[in-house]
Image (cartoon, rainbow, N blue to C red):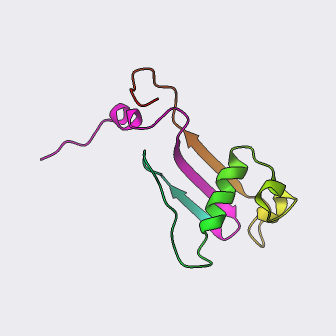
Amino acid sequence: LVARPTEIERLRQYKTGSILRVKLKNFLTYAAVEFRPGPRLNVVIGPNGTGKSTILCAICLGLGGQPPLLGRADDARTFIKNDEEIAEIEIELSPPNNTSTNN
């Protein structure tokens, strides 16, 4: 039987500033979604039209990128899901970890 890592042990796997969690609400094609990338390489794959670019747009906007940078629209309001008033992007980043050897 293998014990699950504690939250501190899990966080030590991530470099400072790594994305721990992304949560979207009413963002383009997503009514609500939350995902937790792993501490290493993450790849977004899927058929055309399934929301891969939407995830990347949300990460860029959520980290302060401007809409024109994405090449989709000049106004952030165009990223709100149809028939909704507001969209939310929540991104949780890994905190500084001085004891980690992978920083």
Residue 47, horizontal then vertical, whole percent:
54, 78
Residue 84, horizontal then vertical, whole percent:
77, 67
- Residue sticking out furthest to the left: 1
Q: Is residue 72 above or below residue 96?
A: below
Q: Residue at x 64, y 58 (%)?
A: 56
Tell me the quarter of the picture where residue 81 sits: bottom right
In the rendered structure, the answer to whether residue 70 lies left or right of residue 50 reads: right
Q: Is residue 83 above or below residue 101?
A: below
Q: Residue at x 76, y 64 (%)?
A: 80
Tell me the quarter of the picture where residue 6 sits: top left
Closer to us: 12 or 92: 12
In the rendered structure, the answer to whether residue 38 lies left or right of residue 16 reads: left
Counting the numbered discs, the total is: 0
Residue 51, horizontal then vertical, whole percent:
61, 70
Closer to us: 92 or 37: 37
- Residue sticking out furthest to the bottom: 48
Magenta span includes 18? yes
Q: Residue at x 36, y 38 (%)?
A: 10
Residue 77, horizontal then vertical, whole percent:
83, 60
Q: Residue at x 80, y 62 (%)?
A: 71
Q: Where does the magenta region start and end?
A: 1-30
Magenta span includes 64? no
- Residue sticking out furthest to the top: 98
